[in-house]
Amino acid sequence: MRTIPWPLLTICAVLASWSDRAVAVGADWADVRPIIESRCLPCHGGERVQGGLVMTDASAFARGGDRGAVVDRSDWASSLLLQVIAYDNPELAMPPSGMLPETERMLLESWVLSGAHWPKDAEGVLAEFPEPSPVLDRTSDAATGWWSYQPLAEPKHADLNLASPSEAIDLLFDEHLSALGLAAADEASPEQLLRRASYDLIGLPPTPEETDSFVLAWRQDPSATWAAAVDRLLDSPAYGEHWARFWLDQVRFAETNGYERDSTKPNIWRYRDWVIRALNEDLPYDAFLRYQLAGDEYDTLSDRQEYPVSPELATGYFRLGVWDDEPADRIQAKANQTADIVDTTAQLALGMTLGCARCHDHKADPISQRDYFAFTAYFNNITGYGDNHAWASRPESVRLVADGHGPEFLSAKDRDEKVVRIQNELIAEAQELALPRTPTQTLLPDARDGGTLWRYWDQPQPDGVSAQAYDDSAWPQGRGGFGAASTPGALVQSPWRTQEISLRHDFVLRDLPDGLVLSIHHDEDALVFLNGIQVAAFDGFRTDYIDVQLPSSALDALVVGSNTLVVLCRQSTGGQYIDVGLRTGWLDSSEATVERLRSVIRGGSAEHGAVRSLIDAMDRLKQAPVAEPYEALVVAEYGVQSPDQHIHLRGSAHAEGDRVEPAIPAVLAWAGQPDLDADGLKHSSGRRRAIAEWLTVNAKDITARVLANKLWQGHFGRGLARSSGDFGRLGERPTHPELLEHLASRVLDHKWSLKAMHREIMMSRAYRMSSRASDIALATDRNNNQLQRRDPRRLTAEQYRDAVLQVSGQINRKMFGPSVYPEIEPEVLATASRPNEAWGRSSTDEANRRSIYVFAKRSLRFPLFESFDQPSPDSACLVRFDTNVPTQSLLTLNGNFVNDAALHFSDRLQQEASGLPQQIERGIRLAFGRAPSSEEVDRHVDFVQRISKDFDLSEASALLYFALGLLNANEFMWID
Amino acid sequence: MHDHPSHFCGRTRREFLWQAGGGFTGIALANLLGDAWIADQAQAAHGLSPNLAADPHRPFLTHAPKARSVIFLFMYGGPSQVDTFDHKPKLYGLDGKTIDIPTFGRQGKRAGGRIVGPKWNFKPRGQCGKMVSDLFPCLGECVDDMAFLHSMHAESPIHGSALLNMNCGRITSGHPSLGSWVNYGLGSANENLPGYVVMLDETGGPISGAKNWTSGYMPASHQGVQLRSEGPPILALDPPEHLQGPLQRELLDHLRTENLLHGASRSDNPELNARINQFELAYRMQSEAPEAVDLSQERQSILDLYGIGKAETDPFGRKCLMARRLVERGVRFIQLYSGGGHNDDNWDAHGDLEFNHTRHAGRTDRPIAGLLKDLKQRGLLDETLVVWGGEFGRQPTAEYENQTGRDHNSWGFTMWMAGGGIKGGISVGETDELGAKAVRDRFHVKNLHATILHLMGMDPNNLTYFHNGLDESLVGVEGAEPIRQVLA
C-alpha cells in the first residue's frame, strides 16, 4: 500500500478536487504523451535504455523492464509507475533529475488509474525502437573456438616424446625462436643462476657460502650441480613461504574485513599457514584447489585420505574478502559477497573474467549473464560473513579445527597456566599502580533493579538482527527478564515461552566509559552484541545472575550518542529465562583487572612499559596455536538445500530475473556438467565439491593450462600468456602457444605436482638464459615478447624486505603462527581513525620475521609493501604492476627500516671480516651473491675512506654508508 | 563498449614510448610519481593500452581544461544542510513536532520523527542574496563565487561506505579514488612534488584511513600522498640524523657511479636508468617539498586572512594556505579533511548539533573564506576548482528522543563548488521543503565526479582503466553527465 509522503499532503489537498475529476474522467493519451516523450523517453527508448525498460510504443510499454511491468492491471493504484513518480523511495524515484511538476504527476496518475490506455497504432509510437547494437554472437565459432576454451591440443611435434622433459621445453622454445630468426641467449653465469633460482624458489638471496660451494661444484659438473641446487631449494621450508605470496595475491588475502571497523578476521593466519604447508608438502594442485573450495565436504567422506594438511582449514578461502558489517543494503551486500567469491574463483582457477557478465552478457567473451548466475548457484549457499553467530542446525564459520601439527604446540592446559601466571604478575603491577576507584553508573538495569524496557522478538532470529541499524520498530516491548516463572533464580516480568528470543535496547552515552560490566542470567546459550560487535558469549544455562567484565573490544564498539545492545538467547528444554543489565565500572576479578590495565595503556603512553609487555606476552599466548583443535575461520553453508538462484538483472539483487539451475558456462559444456552429489553431507549442499571435482577432473585441461601459465610467470616474471587472469578475448594471446599446451599436459603427467613442474622448467636451457639481449633481438623484439633472453626482474616488496633482513643478519626464520607487527612510522599511523589502536606491537625479534607473516590490514597497509607494489587486497591480483617512483627511493634512502638494517649490516661486516677491503668484499658477496672485482673493492674503499676523512668519522662508522649504498643499489634490487 | 584493439597501432607499449618520447627514461624523468606507466597502465592486465592519446603526458585530455587543480574540502562526518546552506524556513516552526517523513540513516529506515528546527538563522549574502546560515559569516562573503548543489544524493548513509562512495565512486572498496583518476588521466605537472596530496585533521584520519585516497587496482604510484602540516611533510622526506647534507650527497654520488657501472652492460633495461634518476628526484624533493609548505614565507596579512595564529582556526588555516601554495606549484589534486577520528571530532552530529557544528564551522569558516579570497586576488581561482562537502548530509528530524542531533542522510544534501569553470552566485537542485531528500534536479555523487573531470579537461565517460576484463571508470558503466547548470 502506497503511503503519501508528507510534502505531498499539501499538494494533494489543494488539488484534490481536480484530481477527483481527472480520475473519474481519465487523462487522455494526448495529455500524457508529451510528458512521456519529454520525461521518460530520454532514458527509456530513443538512444538509451535504462533498467531494461523501453517506452517507445504500446507493446514495449506492456512488456515492462527489469523490475517487471510498469503498470499493474489487477490493481492500478499499485502500479510501479505511480510509485516511482511519487518519489516515496528515493532509490526508486523517477525521473532521476527531480520530481515531476504536480500537474504532470497528476495527469500521469489519472491516466494510469483509468487504465493506462496507450494506442497501438501510429499515434502511440513515440520513437523507432533502436536496433540492439551488434554484440558478440556467443555461439559463433569465433567466440566458442577461442583458444582458451579448448581442450589441450595434441602435440604436433613427434620428437617431444623422445626428448627428456626439459629438452622438450627447449625443443619447442628453440623452434619458436628460430622461426623468427632469433637465437636464445647464452647461459647466465653460475652466480647469476644461483641468485635467480634462490629468489625464484625461496624468495631470499643465496648466502656467500652457498654461492661459493655452488660455483666450485659447477666447475666439475654443471648440470648435476644445478639439479642439486634446485632440489635443495625446493626442499627448503622457505619455498612455501615464497610461493604462498603469489597465491595470497590471487585470493586477495587480508586479515581484516575493511570498511568502517576493519575488524580482524579470527585466526585467518591459519589459512596462510595452510597454504605454506600445502606448498611445502607438494600437495598436488588438484587437491590444493579442491580443499580450498570444498575441504569441509571432502573431510566428511569416510574414505579419508592421508592429508599433510587439514582440508577444512583450506576453506578459509571463502572468508578472505572484504565485508561491510554495516551495509546500506543488506541483500545487495550479501549478493556482492557471493559475487566476489564467484569472480575470484573463476579468475584464479579458469583464467576467466566471469565478473564482467554479472550485470549483462559479457561484451567480449561468450559468457552470458545466465552463465554467470548458473555458476553462482554453486556458491550461493555459503553463509554470509556476518551470519556466523546465529544458531541454526549448521556449523558456524568459526570452528575448532585441528591442523595436524598439534604435537608441535603447547597444550591448552599449559597455555592457560602460563596465562594465569602472567595475570598474577599483572595483578601485582596493578596493586602498585593503585588504580583509583571509578564510579559505577547503571546504563541498563537488570530485573533486580526494576529491569530494562526491551524490544523483543520471540520467533527465530531474523537475519542481521545483531546490527545496530536493524529496524526493530515493529517488535513488541517488554520489561526484562523474560522467561517462565518456574526457572530458578528468575525474576520474570515478561513471558517468553518459545525456543529463541532476541532483545534489543538503544541507550545514549554522553561520555565513553573506561570499563563496562555486564550482568546476566540466561538459559542455555546467550550472545551479546554492542553496536553489532559480539562482546560476550555464554554457553549452558545458569540459575542466578553473574557479573562479567566486558573486553576492550566492547569499549571500542561504543560511541558517543546512541548505542545498541542486542542479546540473543535460546533454550531447548526446561524453563526459559534471559535478563541482562549493563553498568560502567570495574569488577574486582583478575580478568577485570587485566582489562582495566589494558584500558590504562590504550592511550599509548610510554610509562607503563612493564604492563604493556606483560599484556603483549599474554595476548601472544592466547593467540598462539595449541595442541588441541582450536579456532579457525572456515566455510559454512546454510544447510543441505541451496536456495533458488535467480538472474540478478543489471546485477541488482533486488531485480530477480529467471531462475537458473547450477551449471558451468555453456562455452565449456564440452567438459560435461558437474555431478551434484550430496551423499554423506549433513551440513552443506555438495555443490562446492561438485565444482571442485569438475575443475580438476572434467575441465582439467583448462585448469592445468591456467596453472602452467602461472608457473611460468613465477619463474620468468610473466606468463606465456601475459594476462594470467584473463585468457579471454580482452586478454593477451600466448606468445608461445605450443609450449603452453605442452607445459599444461606435463602438469597432468606429473599428477599436478608443482615441485615436479618447477624442476622441469628450471632444468631447461630456457630458464638458464642470460638477461643480455643480442643486437638483433633488441632491434626486432625490444619488449622481449619472444623471450629471446631472460627478463630482468625487480625484487618484489616482500623479497626486498626479506633480503634486507637477511643480509643485515637480522632475519628471524621462525615459521607460522599469528602475524607480526613491524614498526610503522607514527605519521602513517596518524592516518587511521583510531591511531592508538591501529597497529599491534611485536618484539624486535618477532618483527624481523619474513614478510609473509606481517599482519595484512586492509585500512592500514604496511608502507614499504604498499610503496613497492604489493597489490591492494580488495580484489584478486594475478599480475603485479611494478612502479618506479621517487617516494620509493625516499623510503630506502631515508627510511628507518633500511637505515637501521644498514647499521646492523655494517656491524655484521665488522664482525665477520677484518680489514676494510675484506669487509667490503663480504658485503658485496652477501648483497649481490657474487665476488667483487678488485677495482670494485678499491672504489668502495676509496668512498669509505673519503667520507671517513671528510666528515671526521671512524672507518667503522663510515662503513654504514657503504652498507646503506648496497641496500639501495640497482644490483641489489634487480635479478639478472 | 567496443572491442579493445589488440595492439596499439601495432606497437607494444614500450615501443610506443620509445618512439613517442625518445625513450622510456626521458618520460620517466619528466613525470615524477609515476606517469610513465600511464601509457603502460594495462600491461599488468593485457600488456597494451587502448587509450593512448597523442600526448603521453596527458593521455585523456579531450578538451581545454577550465581547472588546472582541484582542492576538495572534505567535511568528514556529514554537515547538516538545513543548518548551513539549504534554507528551509518551514522547519523553524515545526521544531519539536513529530511528523511522518521517511528517513534512512545509521538507525535504519524510519517513517517519521521529531523535527529539529535549524539552530541558526539565515541571512541573504553577497550580490546574489544567497541565504546562508550564521554558522558561516566569512564564507557568506564569498557566495557570489560559489555554486550550490542542493540536491546531492549518495548511495549509503553509513560513513564507511559513503566515504568510499564520495572518494572512489562506489560503496564497495577496491576502486581508485578521484585524485588517482585525475592524476592517471592528466599526469603530474610538477616533477618534484606528488600530483595528489591529502592533508588530514589533527585528530586522525577518516574511517577506513588510506582507503579514501587509494589508487585501488591502479599502480601504487597514483595513490594520494599524505602531506603533514607539522614536521617533515612527506614520509621519509627527512634524512636520518646521520645522513644530513653533503654526506647524503656523497652517498648518492657514489651510488650513482656504481649504478651506472652496473647498468653499462644492461642498457636494454630502461628501468635501471629510471631508478637512478628517481634518486635524484627524491633528493630534490627533500628541498622542494618543505619549501612548498613553508608558511614562513607568507606575509602577516595573508596569515591573518586564513586565521593562522588564532587557536581555533590555525590548524585548518595552515592546511588551506598550504593548499594554495601547492596549487601554485602545479599539484593537481589536494584533499583537505575537516574532522577526523570518530564522534564529535568530526561533523557527525548525532548528539548535540549546536556544539558540534559550532565547533567545526568555527574551525573552517575563516580559513576556507581566506582560501577563496586569496586564490581570487592572485588570479588563481579561475583555474582552481574548490569543492566543499561531506560524504552525506543530515536529516531534518532528531535521532534521539531528547537531543538536537541529526542522523545521517544520503537522500539529499548540499555541496558547493567554486572557481575554475564554475558559475558563481547560483544554486541548483532542491530538496523537499523540509530538506529531507532531493526532489528537483537531483545529482548523484557520480554527477559531481563527472563535473570535476569535465572541468579538468576530460570526458568522464571515456576516462577508463582496463582491469580484470573490464574498462573501469570512475563514473561506472552507466556513465554520468556533468552538472551543466553550474558550468560557467
Image: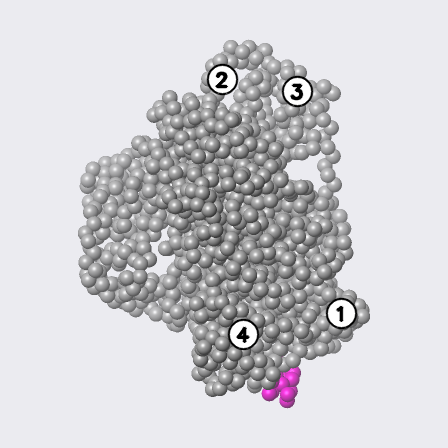
Q: Dot 1: few (<14), some (14–19), or many (≥20) neighbours within 10 Å?
A: many
Whether B71 is among the magenta residues is no
The residue that mark 3 highlights is A33
Residue at 51%, 80% (x, y): give it. A945
Task: Give the Cα distance between marks 3 and 4.
Answer: 77 Å
**Residue A725, image x and y in percent?**
62, 57
* Residue A481 relative to residue B424: left or right: left
User: Which one is earlier in the sequence, the residue at label 1 or at label 4?
Assistant: 1
* Chain identity of mark 3: A
Disc 4, disc 2: CB below 8 Å? Answer: no
Badge 2 and badge 1 in a common chain: yes
> At label 2, which amino acid type do we have?
Ile
Residue mark closest to the camera, 3 vs 1: 1
- Per the image, the residue denoted by label 2 is A11
Tell me the magenta residue range: A215-228
How far is disc 4 from disc 2 in space, using C-alphas?
78 Å
Residue B469, horizontal then vertical, whole percent: 64, 51
**Residue beneath label 1, please?**
A777
Pinpoint the chain carrying mark 4. A
Q: Amino acid at mark 4?
A: Leu
Q: Sequence-wise, which precedes: disc 4 or disc 2? A: 2
Picture quadrant where residue B308 is located:
top left
Q: Which mark is residue A966?
A: 4
Q: Are marks 3 and 1 on the same chain?
A: yes
Q: CA distance from mark 2 to mark 3?
A: 23 Å
Q: Is residue A307 visible?
A: no
Within 10 Å of disc 2 (Cα), the crowding (few <14, some 14-19, many 20+) is few
- N-terminal of the pair, mark 2 or mark 1, is 2
